[in-house]
């Protein structure tokens, strides 16, 4: 467990310990919940259903020669891209607000934000930074 020195303890104040960022991150997570939760009746999340629909449209066009569905495929793909971009923006809001400390405390290894590298989380303990 991390320890904190007396000097670091004395640095803690509302001016350098900003928790509003955590609340903004929580709001972003709440926004995504609607898109990623299962439906009330146990249905899959809408995003999963939409991805499956996009796959079906592509297969109808590629394997079935359904040229009349090409416009629908591109239109639906653009709508789905907008939905995914919205989710990514929400995730970035969470990623941008991980640690509410400023100054010397933010330099403590245990309080530093883990950075995503090569698909894994890296921090001081496992060779990152």
Image (spheres, rainbow, N blue to C red):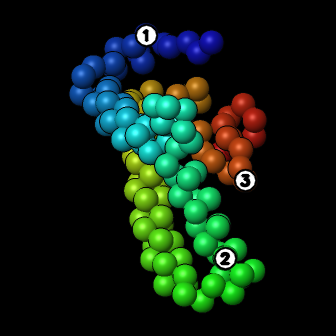
Q: Quadrant of residue 20?
A: top left
Q: Nearer the viewer, mark 1 or mark 2?
A: 2
Residue beneath disc 3: 118
> Does residue 62 appear left or right of residue 115 in this picture?
right
Q: Earlier in the sequence, mark 1 or mark 2?
A: 1
Q: Quadrant of residue 66?
A: bottom right
Q: Position of residue 51 (x, y in %)?
A: 58, 59
Image point (49%, 78%), residue name: 72
Q: Earlier in the sequence, mark 3 or mark 1?
A: 1
- Callouts 3 and 1 close, C-beta under 8 Å: no
Label 3, label 2: how far apart the Cα atoms are: 35 Å
Q: Residues within 10 Å of mark 1 (few under 14, many from 20)?
A: few
Q: Is residue 106 visible?
A: no
Image point (43%, 68%), residue name: 79
Label 3, label 1: how far apart the Cα atoms are: 37 Å
Residue beneath disc 2: 60
> Does residue 76 appear left or right of residue 25 in this picture?
right
Residue beneath disc 1: 6
């Amino acid at each position: 467990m991390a320890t904190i020195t007396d000097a670091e303890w004395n640095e803690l104040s509302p001016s350098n310990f900003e928790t509003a960022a955590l609340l903004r991150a929580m709001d972003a997570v709440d926004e995504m919940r609607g898109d990623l939760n299962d439906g009330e009746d146990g249905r899959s999340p809408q995003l999963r259903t939409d991805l499956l629909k996009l796959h079906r449209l592509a297969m109808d066009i590629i394997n079935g020669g359904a040229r009349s569905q090409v416009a629908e495929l591109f239109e639906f793909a653009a709508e789905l891209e907008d939905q995914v971009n919205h989710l990514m923006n929400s995730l970035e809001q969470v990623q941008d607000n991980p640690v509410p400390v400023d100054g010397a405390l933010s330099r403590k290894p245990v309080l530093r934000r883990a950075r995503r590298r090569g698909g894994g989380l890296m921090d001081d303990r496992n060779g990152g930074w």
